Amino acid sequence: MEVLITSGAWVDPHEDYDVYETPLMAAVIHGRFEAVKKLIGAGANPWFHIGVSQRTAEAYARDYGHEEIASYLAGLPRK
């Protein structure tokens, strides 16, 4: 992941278009806490939401039973 980020891979969609999930959401869904922290450190927006459901990474963390990740995301300051 670090190679991708340092090579300029996007950590958030550049525009509000139809995206199934962000890289942060994928890391959250799979319970990859270290990846979540790296993506946040690289500038991923934890408050980005997808489509009509308005689901955030924190909501996905709770849905998939990753309470430690959900608590971490909930504790992040809103920008």
Image (cartoon, rainbow, N blue to C red):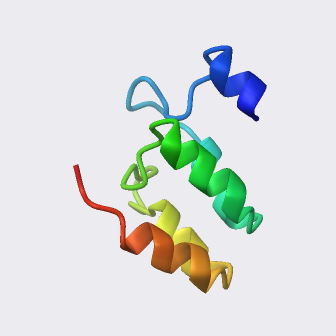
**For residue 71, above or below residue 79:** below
Q: Is residue 30 visible?
A: yes
Q: How far from the left and from the top, in percent, is residue 3? A: 76, 24
Q: How far from the left and from the top, in percent, is residue 4? A: 73, 24
Q: Quadrant of residue 33?
A: bottom right
Q: How far from the left and from the top, in percent, is residue 21? A: 60, 47
Judging depth in this view, the residue of 29 and 76 nearest the camera is: 76
Judging depth in this view, the residue of 22 and 52 nearest the camera is: 22
Quadrant holding the N terminus: top right
Q: Is residue 32 left or right of residue 61?
A: right
Residue in the picture at 48% in, 72% down? 72
Q: Is residue 21 visible?
A: no
Residue in the picture at 45% in, 30% down? 17
Residue in the picture at 39% in, 49% down? 48
- Say how many tags the image has: 0
Q: Quadrant of residue 56?
A: bottom left
Residue in the picture at 65% in, 20% down? 6
Judging depth in this view, the residue of 45 and 19 nearest the camera is: 45
**For residue 42, above or below residue 77:** above
Q: Quadrant of residue 30?
A: bottom right
Q: Residue furthest top?
A: 7
**For residue 31, above or below residue 34:** below
Judging depth in this view, the residue of 46 and 15 nearest the camera is: 46
